[in-house]
Amino acid sequence: MPTGFARMALPAWWEDEIAQSKSGLQQAQMYFARAFHIDLVSLAQSSGPVRFQETQRKFKLSRNVVESDVSVSAHFATAIANLALVGVGTKQSIVPKDPVELRAAILQKHSCVSLSALLAWCAEANIPVLHIHKLPGKKMTGLVVREDGRFAIVLSKKGTPAHLLFHLAHELGHIANGHLQENGFVADEKIGGADAGDADEKEADAYAIRLLNGKEVSYGPGASSVIRSGVALYKAALARATQERIDVGHIILNYGNSQKNHPLANMALKSIPGESDGIKVVNSAFVQALDASKLSDDQVELLKTATGYNA
């Protein structure tokens, strides 16, 4: 782990001389254990390897990626997610097993299941959702954490609100389908195009599609139409989005995926008005939902440093 990144665990007021005393060293060890999901006893021992906390771990990986590539990042994200759980209400709502049920609940208050609408539901359910862009190792796309029966979600890839909407819906699919039965995490190094042999990923993808669309669907051009420009795709997607109460960005990305034309989809996304940075949407909603009075100043500082959100 880079030394500069490790220092993130320490509060701004920290001076290295503090660790020269026994009590100061113990304090530093506590900060590092908290920030990186490390077993404190192993960190305090003068001999033997430092270990992460023993929890259930599920890694969903691309070909040629191994657990060790993303393990440090996943444990850091888990520690930050556990800290986020301290800053929200303790009673969480259950994520409905049926995605259409969750969709119906959201549509009672919103025009479609957009990123902001889904984040609002998560906030009401006391499920913290945060974005961590800088990680100490290879990034995951998303991660679900379970701690004492409560869940938190971390996203970590850049993207538009439409990209992060699908990532969030996918992670909610892991929760709804009971893929995490003990304390621990499911780390999705990649989301979408699930490995045919991974039942969890297929279920989470299917959940996301039905939550966002109300049904299993892949969008394509009509029998008598050919879409040749980003503007044309945006206009066609907007017409359907308005009629069927679906996020226009999701329709565009769904089309790009099904037609294997991601450049066209990315051009179409540029026509969508409003905030184009999904990270800002996620972390502004997270900070609004966070009750800082439940956390120490050092804990709030670590959360804001990890998310990069200081507004």
Image (tube, helix red, strand yellow):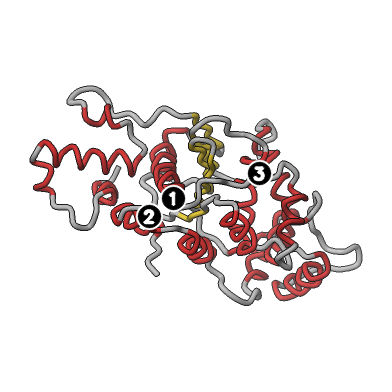
Tag 2: residue type?
Leu
Q: Which residue is mark 1?
A: 84
Q: Residues within 10 Å of mark 2 (few under 14, many from 20)?
A: many
Relative to 235, residue 2 above or below: above
Does residue 177 appear to the left or right of 222 in the view shown? Answer: left
Mark number, residue 173: 3
Q: Residues within 10 Å of mark 1 (few under 14, many from 20)?
A: many
- Circles 1 and 2, Cβ within 8 Å, touching? The answer is yes
**Camera-nearest residue between 25 and 150:** 150
Q: Which residue is mark 2?
A: 303
- Circles 1 and 3, Cβ within 8 Å, touching? The answer is no
Task: Classify mark 1: helix, strand or loop.
Answer: helix
Relative to 8, residue 177 above or below: above
**Camera-nearest residue between 110 and 267:** 110
Tag 1: residue type?
Ala
Q: Residues within 10 Å of mark 3 (few under 14, many from 20)?
A: many
Quarter occupied by the C terminus:
bottom left
Rendered location of residue 150, percent (x, y): 53, 41
Relative to 226, residue 10 above or below: above
- Circles 3 and 2, Cβ within 8 Å, touching? The answer is no
What separation in Å lies between label 1 and label 3 (alpha carbons)? 20 Å
What residue is shown at x 54% (from left), y 64% (from top)?
278
Q: Earlier along the polypeptide chain: callout 3 or callout 2? A: 3
What residue is shown at x 86% (from left), y 68% (from top)?
225
Task: Classify mark 2: helix, strand or loop.
Answer: helix
Rendered location of residue 246, percent (x, y): 75, 63
Tag 3: residue type?
Gly
